[in-house]
Amino acid sequence: MADVAIDADIASRLQKGTEPAWVRHHIPGARTWLTFVTIGELSKWAQVRAWGEVRRARLEGWIAARPMIPYDREVAQVRGRFAGNAQRRGRPRPPNGTWVAACSIRVGVPLVTLTAKTSRTS
């Protein structure tokens, strides 16, 4: 079974069934990892949009069914190098995107994202 990490945009689209065809190519049969950042973003969206208990419970069940890439020292160091190199090149990246990418790099799984400024699987 292949593993992939997904960001919040992909997670949201998968739950709605509105993911692009290229995403459907990478996801079937894959174990989909969430990052601690992705879970935080999904939780924030539910809060901002004032989701009710039923919808929040559905989200929690969806999250619970997937492994999470946690924060650790190596994730922080990978993120620091990744963000630092991007800044030195004059092309800084969004903070949450660099955390998600660092988590993916840390565990060695491809990242599936809709964000052009972050790594995308091909």
Image (tube, grey):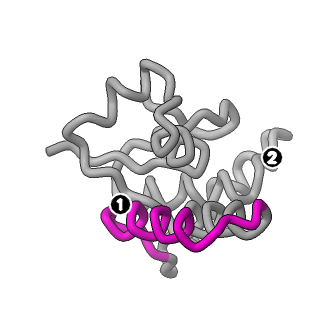
The structure residue drawn at horizontal position 46% and vertical position 48%, both measured from the top left corner, is: 6
Answer whether residue 51 is visible to the viewer in this image.
Answer: yes
Residue 107 circle label? 1
Of callouts 2 and 1, the N-terminal one: 2
Amino acid type indicated by mark 1: Val
Residue 44, percent from left and from top = 71, 67
Whether residue 80 is visible, yes or no, is: no
How far across and how far down the image is residue 106, in percent? 42, 62
Q: Element under label 1?
A: helix
What is the quadrant of the N terminus in the image? top left
Cβ–Cβ below 8 Å for labels 2 and 1?
A: no
Q: Position of residue 121 (x, y in %)?
A: 44, 31
Q: Residue furthest right?
A: 90
User: Compared to 122, does 89 lie above or below?
Assistant: below
Q: Nearer the viewer, residue 6 or 90?
A: 6
Label 1 environment density (alpha carbons within 10 Å; few <14, some 14–19, many ≥20): some
Q: Is residue 55 left or right of residue 29?
A: right
Residue 82 in the image, given as x and y percentages of width and height: 63, 54
Name the foreground residue: 55 vs 109. 55
Which quarter of the rendering shows the C terminus?
A: top left
Residue at 70% in and 55% down: 83
Is 53 contained in the magenta span?
yes
The residue drawn where x is 50% and y is 48% is: 11
Amino acid type, callout 2: Pro
* Badge 2 element: loop
Q: Which residues are magenta?
A: 49-70
Tell me the residue that label 2 is attached to: 92
User: In the image, 8: left or right of 26?
Assistant: right
